[in-house]
Image: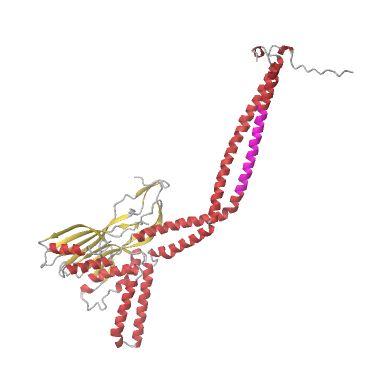
Amino acid sequence: MKAPNLHLNLLHASERQSSSPVRLRVMLPILAALACAGCLLWWGILKGQLMLVKKDMAAIQKDIDAITPIHADVTNDLNAIRHMQFRLDQLSMYTNACHRYGDVLANVVSSSEEVSTGLKLQEMKLILEPEKQDLSVYDAQRKKKVELPGPTNPVEIVKFEINGRAPDDKPVKECVRELLEKLKGPDFRGTFISVESSTYYDQRQTFKINYRCAERRFEK
Amino acid sequence: MKEETFQAPSELMKRALFRSLLIVAVAVVLYMFCVVPEQTSLQMAKEKKAALGTQLADMKSKVARKAEVKAESGDISLTVTNKMEKLLLERDPIIGDYESTAKTLLDPIAKLFYVPDQKDADDSKIFEIRLSDKKMDPRRLPLPATAVPLPPNTSLQLYARQPIWLTCTGPRESIIRFIATVEDVADGGEITKNRLKKAYEQEKKEDFGQLTEEEREKREEEMKASLEQISSLSEKMSGVTLEAFKFTVPQGKDDKSGSADMVFEWPIRLEEKYVVPQGGKKK
């Protein structure tokens, strides 16, 4: 007995005009289905990736939660350090700007006596001259201008003024010259920086000397 | 592919095209409403994971420094409280103001320069200090506290400088030595203590022969008390500095005595903490 012949006729009569009509009719839906399947697969892969990332995130979050109390302690300590460092800085800036004048004043007196016993120091002045500042600032939180305590500039000028009278038996010019020479000595180095002005009046035998002293520097 | 295929498509071809379009539409919908949002979510999740990773690494690095930070915090706290905060002039709650509190600290030093028997002494030899008050010069007082300049990049004003204005009369040497003694006490008081000890030794040599045992003991106790007082003052006065000074000899008097205005400066705690707004000054 002969086996029946299986003949699959994929080509319909209406399709005989095309060069390859079967491929198009079959391939188009197949390609579209493949594209759709590709999208589904892509979506699936993304879902999987997202799941993994979320799993990792949960693990990291768990680790973070576990160390949060210790971290909070350390952060508090660090904040306290910062705050105390800030206090330390402000107070250090103050102490660095402290000068000592007692010995200098005593040395000025003894120097004047060395120049002449009759030389009289009628006035000695130590003057602090802070620069004038506009201390009003705009506070964004309070939405108004606030006045800060000040001045806050880190350098303050210090001056020293001597008003004196020379003895009758010695010219005032000579006295001033000698006194200026004495005040250049090592006892005054670091305190008296420069002579700003020195004036004398021959008739009245009086003189006035202005010194620029070492500035007060509020620095760390 | 021939043109006729599309010009006159067969029924099967039409169906295939329709099915294909439908499937493509489904694919587009899938891409737009599933793939793209999922991609965005994944991107965001990855960024969040990276941020969490960085946060964890930061936290771990901080936690690893726990012991070090604890030790540093202890050290700096000790420095601030034991050393630096002692600089501050604390307002005595009973006395009230800073000026009077400062005066109570300066008075024991001023006593070192008093002429023992003031009744017999010449006026010019009497050393006296007093607070400059409104009655004396209403224009100048009260001297306001000024801010301690801030370090760069900081915004919290915690301390100020309180000027204490004193008026002093007496011999010029005493006035100057008073300033030098205040400064020495602020620096630890060693010179003053040595001077007191020297004077005591001298006194012992010269006058102790005339004193009874009881008087000698009393004098020794006084001496010890003075030294202790200098040490205790030294702790409270470590922040003091001379801010301004003016010594004047009154007309017709010799230049060995006169009066002086002196302004000592003390750091104080600001009662209101001034927060300097960020972003600098605006006029």
Using the image as rendered, state which of residue B95 and residue B10 is in the foreground.
B10
Residue B147 lies left or right of residue A25; in this view the side is left
Q: Quadrant of the C terminus of chain A?
A: bottom left
> Residue visible at 33% across and 75% down?
B194
Corner quadrant of residue B209: bottom left
In the shown orientation, is residue A34 left or right of residue B160?
A: right
Q: How many marks?
A: 0
Q: Residue furthest right?
A: A1
Q: How is the image coloured?
A: secondary structure
Would residue B16 be visible to someone looking at this image? yes
Q: Magenta stretch: give its range.
A: A35-61
* Image point (19%, 63%), residue name: A181
Of the 4 image quadrants, the one containing the N terminus of chain A is top right
Q: Is residue B211 above or below residue A131?
A: below
Image location of residue A3, percent across then percent down: 86, 19
Q: Quadrant of residue B269?
A: bottom left
Q: Is B224 or B249 nearer to us in this picture?
A: B224
Magenta segment includes B279: no
Residue A10 placement: quadrant: top right
The percent position of residue A203, horizontal first and vertical second, equals: 9, 61
Q: Position of residue B188 (x, y in %)?
A: 36, 69
Q: Position of residue B67 (x, y in %)?
A: 53, 59
Question: Outermost residue, front direction?
Answer: A2
Left or right: residue A194 versus residue A13 is left
Q: Can you see residue B171?
A: no
Q: Give the dominant element type of the magenta stretch: helix, strand or loop.
A: helix
Q: Is A40 part of what is drawn in magenta?
A: yes
